[in-house]
Image: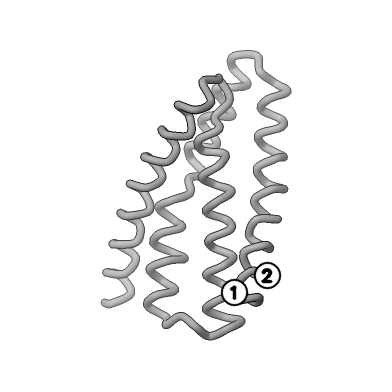
């Protein structure tokens, strides 16, 4: 039961922060490209890598803290459905090059960010 409460609280906090940060970033980049979601997803992958590194490599997080941060917070903070919808919008509006960059850039950069999070946790 503690795991469910940790996930519930983490995902709520992550969702609120995702919405706020995404809107704030999009205000700075007044552009059709979805920079807000792009930045949030990269940050979420870095945080997830950091949590994994701290929990599994360094044993510095309890199982409930890992659930709160990894499943709850990062799950609520990042968003694949928004990523998919924004790519569809880019494609429908003829921004094919931006869609290709967003898809491949997100996947490659997010994997690198997760790896950097794990390395950072090992360094801590």
Question: For residue 62, what is the image quadrant?
Answer: bottom left
* Disc 2, SS: helix
Residue beneath the point at 30% across and 54% down: 12
**Is tag 1's residue or tag 2's residue first in the polypeptide sequence?**
1
Report whether 5 appears left or right of 45: left
> Which x, y percent locates residue 43?
55, 51
Question: For residue 119, what is the image quadrant?
Answer: bottom right
Residue at the top extreme, as displayed: 94
* Disc 1, SS: helix
> Which x, y percent locates residue 2?
28, 77
Q: As displayed, is residue 24 above or below residue 50?
A: above
Report whether 99 appears left or right of 10: right
How far apart marks 1 and 2 lie (CA) works out to 7 Å
Rate crowding at label 2 as few (under 14), some (14 to 19) or many (20 or more) other CA atoms within 10 Å. some
Residue at the bottom extreme, as displayed: 59
Residue beneath the point at 50% across and 35% down: 36
Q: Nearer the viewer, residue 18 or 124?
A: 124
> Which x, y percent locates residue 76?
40, 52
Query: Which quadrant of the rendered structure holds the N terminus?
Result: bottom left
Residue beneath the point at 70% across and 55% down: 112
Query: Which quadrant of the rendered structure holds the C terminus?
Result: bottom right
Residue beneath the point at 60% across and 73% down: 121
Residue 119's disc number: 2
Residue assigned mark 1: 53
Q: As displayed, is residue 108 above or below residue 1?
A: above
Question: For residue 73, what is the image quadrant?
Answer: bottom left
Q: Nearer the viewer, residue 94 or 25?
A: 25
Given contact means CB atoms under 8 Å apart, are the residues at marks 1 and 2 in contact?
yes
Rate crowding at label 1 as few (under 14), some (14 to 19) or many (20 or more) other CA atoms within 10 Å. many
> Which x, y percent locates residue 3?
33, 74
């Amino acid at each position: 039961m503690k795991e469910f409460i940790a996930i519930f609280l983490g995902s709520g906090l992550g969702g609120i922060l995702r919405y706020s940060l995404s809107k704030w970033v999009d205000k700075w980049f007044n552009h059709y490209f979805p920079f807000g979601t792009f930045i949030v997803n990269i940050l979420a992958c870095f945080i997830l890598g950091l949590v994994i590194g701290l929990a599994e490599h360094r044993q510095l997080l309890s199982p409930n803290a890992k659930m709160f941060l990894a499943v709850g917070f990062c799950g609520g903070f990042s968003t694949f459905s928004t990523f998919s919808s924004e790519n569809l919008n880019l494609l429908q509006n003829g921004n094919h090059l931006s869609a290709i960059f967003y898809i491949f850039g997100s996947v490659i950069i997010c994997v690198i960010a997760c790896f950097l999070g794990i390395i950072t946790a090992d360094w801590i």
